[in-house]
Image (cartoon, helix red, strand yellow):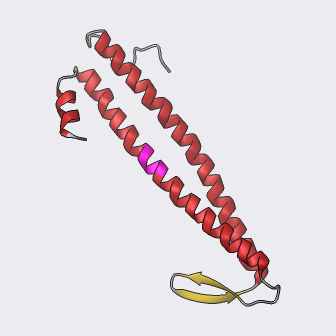
Amino acid sequence: MGTHDQHMQGHLPPAAQEKYAEIEELQDEAEQVVIEKQRLSDRVDQSQAALDALSEAEPDADVYRSIGSIRFPTDHDAAESSLEATIDAAETRIETLDEKEQRLQEQFAHRKEEIKHLLGAGGSTSPGTGDQQ
């Protein structure tokens, strides 16, 4: 939080300050969701590239799997199954994160409306009495 934000928050009524803090937490959480989605998207891209390369390889070509810095021989079918499972798991997690990101955006918008309501009402209402959901 920047010094301008800290200064502004200090002039808000306590209920609005609480909502403002919740907004900051939602922003932090949304940022983590975006980072994880990007990491998973990169994993899907890399796994898909490996799967594409595997499909272009000769069926009897040597195939290796890396675990850390060690490479182990594996068979074509096992490598293909492993890559497909990695892609499926990452895509499923991305879908879950998309849903979470949408919920966070809705909560963010709701908190902003609550702050506007609190400030418009002079801060005299208690939190959670807004009409928004």
Judged by its main secondary structure, the magenta piece is helix
Residue 128 screen position, x and y as percent: 39, 19
Q: Quadrant of the N terminus?
A: top left
**Image position of 88 (left or right of 112):** right
Please provide the residue range marked out in magenta: 30-34
Q: Is 31 colored magenta in this rendering?
A: yes
Vertical side of 91 occupied by 106: above or below = above
Residue positioned 33% across, 27% down in the render:
19
| Residue appearing at x 40%, y 20% in the figure | 113
Q: Position of residue 59 (x, y in %)?
A: 83, 85
**Picture residue at 54% right of the left edge, 37% below the top:** 102
**As drawn, 14 above or below 80:** above
**Viewer-side residue, 38 vs 22:** 38
Q: Is residue 102 left or right of residue 122?
A: right
Q: Is residue 17 magenta?
A: no
**Residue 82 shows in the view:** no
Residue 130 relative to residue 95: left or right: left
* Residue 11 vertical position relative to residue 52 in the rendered view, above or below: above
User: Can residue 61 be seen here?
Assistant: yes
Q: Quadrant location of residue 89?
A: bottom right
